[in-house]
């Protein structure tokens, strides 16, 4: 077992705490000895060494009562915990804890779908419920409802929502579509947010607010409580669905695409989570870099043009969909065609035009709520492929899209990496996701990727672009960029942490939020 424990915790105390946790959940659900079971909780894609983010133990409770007992033990011994829902977040840190010496609390056994209500189109789920599981349940029941999955369907519905994840249907802003949480605080208190705090409530999953301050947000991307249940609104199956893709041949078309799509999104002509996807993101789903070049460094323009030609792709590829009765979709599409089709070189593709094309097929599924795992093919772009996602927020404005693209591409090329990115277009913003694909077995390349990521954080923040989510290794750096008014927001986060979790046992360091004694130690 990796014995890298906090200064205040002796190995004997840690062993006793683990022994007591074992008595709560049973031998089968505690992993303590160093070996494959424990090491399966490492971050498989980390830019750092394997042991940088490796738990000293793992406990997997099944239910609120077991969580409460584990919290009591952790408070008694001041054992730091790290809570995960299913541990499948391999873009931003996987199931690993912030540092060695933590006990991972794995909620995968809490995988019950408590309710799916077809009349009001919602689900109430536990943390371990995956997109695949919820989708299959709805299909088996024959409900006319769609879910909104993240790209990897094996992820947790609740976990992705808490991390501010996005999807591909009109319900793509997952936190916006949540309704009601059950939360266990560090002292074991169980509370329900919104209408759930009213005994005998009839509206917990129907109305997001209750009476008084709305607290749901403080339990997202935080370490202030353990969310054990969450309501999610589902999309009623529409009478029609029209997915489409538009390819654009030129790199500098990004400006015009972004300017054209903004009014379509703000006015909800395009209602779903639309995406402007770079060439290599699309290509990496179905091919590898080695098929085109064995040279080191980013691919030259001549090779990019060859890839585009071979796969009928543009330098930019725009995906969206329309939903509803056919006359309504036809009318909306006229506006789409006039705006996005007016850019020279635009070529439209519809259902049936790209049969057998995996990059088309998986996005068409996602935009109609069918989870899959196809996007993970991208990590095979290079040998020993791993990835870490850099994702600054951008206004839906051509000038900003180009500025971010040029900034990230230039730095990526400088460090020897390809630009593999996409813009997820929301109502008024875009999540610009740059997949930094690197060979994890190459130590020098791994170190270059780590350095590049840190440089991008600082440059983006200096230009006014903040990250919305990040890898464990960069949480403090990004938290430090949100420093308006002498860091007033993070000072409030720390005040909340000290009040709700005085022993600092819940995920210390999550999103740069540390308990008081660890802040003092770091200082």
Image: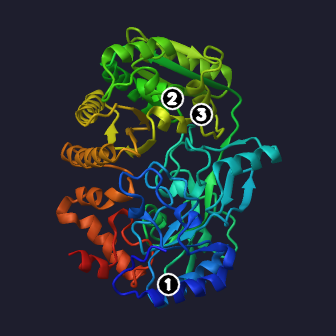
Discs 1/2, front: 1
Specify few, some or many for label 2: CA neighbours under 10 Å numbering under 14, 14-19, or 20 or more: many
Q: Which residue is found at the position 68% from the left and 55% from the top?
A: 123
What residue did someone put label 2 on?
Answer: 270
- Vertically, is 179 above or below 182? above
**Dividing the image into 4 quarters, which one contains the C terminus?**
bottom left
Instruction: Report how far apart the C-alphas of labels 3 and 1 lie in the structure.
Output: 42 Å
Rendering coords of residue 3 (x, y %): 42, 77
Rendering coords of residue 162 (x, y %): 50, 58
Q: Which residue is found at the position 22% from the left and 64% from the top?
A: 487
Rendering coords of residue 179 (x, y %): 58, 58
Closer to the camera in the image, 393 or 390:
390
Secondary structure found at label 2: loop
Discs 3/1, front: 1
Specify few, some or many for label 3: CA neighbours under 10 Å numbering under 14, 14-19, or 20 or more: many
What residue did someone put label 1 on?
Answer: 74
Rendering coords of residue 513 (x, y %): 34, 69
Closer to the camera in the image, 444 or 517:
444
Q: Residue furthest top?
A: 344
- Vertically, is 252 above or below 197? above
Closer to the camera in the image, 171 or 357:
357
Mark 3 or mark 2, which has the lower sequence index? Answer: 2
Instruction: Report how far apart the C-alphas of labels 3 and 2 lie in the structure.
Output: 12 Å
Closer to the camera in the image, 24 or 128:
24
Mark 1 or mark 2, which has the lower sequence index? Answer: 1
Secondary structure found at label 3: loop
What residue did someone put label 3 on?
Answer: 367
Mark 3 or mark 1, which has the lower sequence index? Answer: 1
Q: Which residue is found at the position 64% from the left and 76% from the top?
A: 64
- 171 vs 498, left or right, is right
Q: Residue furthest right?
A: 141
């Amino acid at each position: 077992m990796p014995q890298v424990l906090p200064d205040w915790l002796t190995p004997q105390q840690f062993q006793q705490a683990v022994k007591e946790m074992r008595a709560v959940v049973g031998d089968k659900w505690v992993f303590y000895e160093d070996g494959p079971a424990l090491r399966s909780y490492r971050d498989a894609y980390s830019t750092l060494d394997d042991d940088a983010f490796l738990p000293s133990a793992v406990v997997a409770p099944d239910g609120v009562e077991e969580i409460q007992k584990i919290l009591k033990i952790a408070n008694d011994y001041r054992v730091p915990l790290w809570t995960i829902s299913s541990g499948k977040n391999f873009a931003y840190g996987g199931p690993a804890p912030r540092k060695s010496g933590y006990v991972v609390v794995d909620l995968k056994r809490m995988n019950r779908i408590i309710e799916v209500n077809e009349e009001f189109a919602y689900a109430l789920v536990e943390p371990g419920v995956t997109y695949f599981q919820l989708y299959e349940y709805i299909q088996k029941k024959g409900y006319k409802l769609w879910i909104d999955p993240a790209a990897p369907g094996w992820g947790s519905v609740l976990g992705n929502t808490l991390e501010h994840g996005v999807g591909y249907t009109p319900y793509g802003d997952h936190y916006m579509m949540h309704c009601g949480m059950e939360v266990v605080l560090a002292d074991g208190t169980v509370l329900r947010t919104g209408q759930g705090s009213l005994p005998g409530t009839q509206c917990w999953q129907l109305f997001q607010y209750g009476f008084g301050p709305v607290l749901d947000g403080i339990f997202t991307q935080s370490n202030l409580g353990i969310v054990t249940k969450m309501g999610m609104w589902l999309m009623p199956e529409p009478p029609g669905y029209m997915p489409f893709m538009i390819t654009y041949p030129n790199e500098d078309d990004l400006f015009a695409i972004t300017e054209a799509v903004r009014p379509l999104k703000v006015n909800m002509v395009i209602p779903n989570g639309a995406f402007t996807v770079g060439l290599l993101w699309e290509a990496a789903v179905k091919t590898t870099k080695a098929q085109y070049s064995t040279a080191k460094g980013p691919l030259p323009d001549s090779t990019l043009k060859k890839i585009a030609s071979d796969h009928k792709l543009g330098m930019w590829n725009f995906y969206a969909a329309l939903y509803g009765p056919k006359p309504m979709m036809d009318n909306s599409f006229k506006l789409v065609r006039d705006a996005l089709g007016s850019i020279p070189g635009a070529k439209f593709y519809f259902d049936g035009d790209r049969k057998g094309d995996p990059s088309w097929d998986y996005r068409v599924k996602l935009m109609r709520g069918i989870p899959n795992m196809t996007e993970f093919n991208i990590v095979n772009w290079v040998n020993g492929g791993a990835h870490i996602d850099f994702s600054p927020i951008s206004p839906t404005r051509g000038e900003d899209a180009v500025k971010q693209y040029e900034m990230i591409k230039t730095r990526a090329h400088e460090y020897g990496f390809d630009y593999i990115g996409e813009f997820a277009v929301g109502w008024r913003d875009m999540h610009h996701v740059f997949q930094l694909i690197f060979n994890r077995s190459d130590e020098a390349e791994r170190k270059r990727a780590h350095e590049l990521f840190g440089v991008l954080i600082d440059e983006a923040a200096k230009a006014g672009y903040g990250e919305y989510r990040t890898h464990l290794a960069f949480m403090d750096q990004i938290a430090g960029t949100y420093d308006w008014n002498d860091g007033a927001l993070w000072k409030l986060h720390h005040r909340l942490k000290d009040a709700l979790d005085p022993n600092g046992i819940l995920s210390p360091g999550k999103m740069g939020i540390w308990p008081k004694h660890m802040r003092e130690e770091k200082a």
